[in-house]
Every structure is written in structure tokens, then in C-alpha cells.
Image (tube, rainbow, N blue to C red):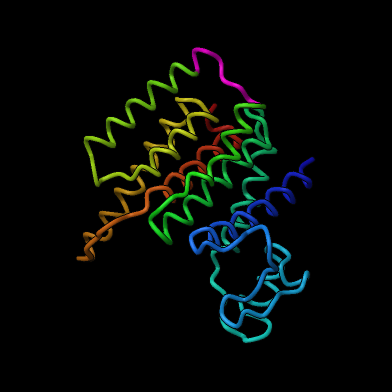
Amino acid sequence: MLIFNILLSICLASFGGVIALRLPANESFVKGRSHCDYCYHQLTWYQIIPIISYLYLQGKCAYCQHRIQPTIFIIEIIGLIAGLEASFQHLYNPYILIFLIITVAVAAMTDVLFLHIWPIILLPTIISTVIWQPLTLIAWKYWLVWAIILILLFIVLHGKIGFGDIEVMLLLALVLGINPTLEIVLLATIFIMIYYAIYQFNNHKLTAVAFVPFLLLALLIRLGAYCLGFCQ
């Protein structure tokens, strides 16, 4: 199952990367062949093999030789990590966990590129969680309290935190539960404070910072720590 989980996760991540790039441009991510974003030449099947094709082509288009943005390659690597982490844990449904990590990765990608998160990105994980990993009544109560707290924070810190960040944190709590989510949010907050401090030290002015990438990093570290036995 390990190999299957990894292959599935990488392929889903690659497709998620396409969604993250095409959705904001109102371009169909269901129809149409993959193509170079610069010369628009359609790619053959062996040029779209996740991870391998990017490495083989050395990050360049096979036709125009223009350097390819590494965004989809990065998300495919995250898919590889997701497949490994989902396979070496026993708390959650591995496929829902794969969906979660890839969903957060896609949201992080759109957050970085467009400072916006499309709610439709979150739907597959929400639906699969409700169907295959339903919450108990007490878990729903905790989730509702968490939702109220986050909405109040959004109102109080208006302009300081995006609603997309709220949606991702609610999704994390839906799948992982409250305690792991609090740990992930705390870790992500520490990361963003360090990031902000480095920018301030270098006299760079920050306008808006995408928070979801820090949530993604914290999520991967938290799950990795569990897989290695450092936390429960």
C-alpha cells in the first residue's frame, strides 16, 4: 500500500497544482491538454510524469527551452511527503490525510501567488471527511467553538487575517481535531513571526504575508513528528 499511496498522492498533488494555476485564470482544469505556459506547445505523456519529467528536462520546456516555474514540481514533492506521512501513521484515514495535505498545499500555492483561496478547493476534503471520517457529537461541539473563536478573531483583527486562513484552520480541525490543529497554528505563528523578524532586520517592509504556507509547513512537521514517534 505504501507505493500505491505515494503514487496516488503525487498524481493528486500534480493535478492540484494544475487547479491552483488554472482556476484563477478561469481556465478549465478538466478539459484541455497540458501545455507550456510560454510557447503553449502541448506536452506529450512522458513530459508530464510527476517529478521525473521536471528533473529530466532540468526545469526547462522541451520546445522553447524557457525555464519552467517550479511551483507544480514543489507541490508534487509535497505530494510525495503526504503519501509517506499518510502511510506511516495510524490515527487518521490515510486517504483523507492525503486529501488534506494536498488541499492545504494547493491553498498555500494560491495564497502565495494570488493572496486568495478559492473555497471550492476545500470541498473534496470536507466531503470525504464527513462521509468516511465522521465526527462525534462532542467533536462537532469543539469544532463549532473553534469556528466561533476564529470568526471573532477575523472580526477583531479585520485586515490582519484573511478569511481563507480561517477556512483552512477550520478544515484542519475538521480532519485532525482541535488539539493537533492548535499545535499546528501555534507552530505556524512562530514561523511567521520569525519570517517577519528577518524581514524587519533586513529593513524590508512587508505589506501582506500569505499565512497558509506556514500552516502547511507546520502541518507537515507535526505529522512527521508523529510518524517518527515524537508526539501523539
- Residue 190 is situated, as x and y percent measured from the top left of the image, at 34, 43
- Residue 105 is situated, as x and y percent measured from the top left of the image, at 53, 50
> Looking at the figure, which quarter contains the C terminus?
top right
Q: Please say whether residue 127 is one of the residues in the magenta stretch.
A: no
Left or right: 229 as drawn, with respect to 204 = right
Quick check: 69 above or below 16?
A: below
Identified at 57% across, 83% down, the residue is 66
Q: Is 23 in front, or is 143?
A: 23
- Residue 134 is situated, as x and y percent measured from the top left of the image, at 61, 22
- Residue 163 is situated, as x and y percent measured from the top left of the image, at 36, 42
> Looking at the figure, which quarter contains the N terminus?
top right
- Snapshot quadrant of residue 148: top left
Residue lying farthest bottom? 64
- Snapshot quadrant of residue 76: bottom right
Left or right: 160 as drawn, with respect to 164 = left
Q: Is 22 in front, or is 102?
A: 22
Residues drawn in magenta: 132-139
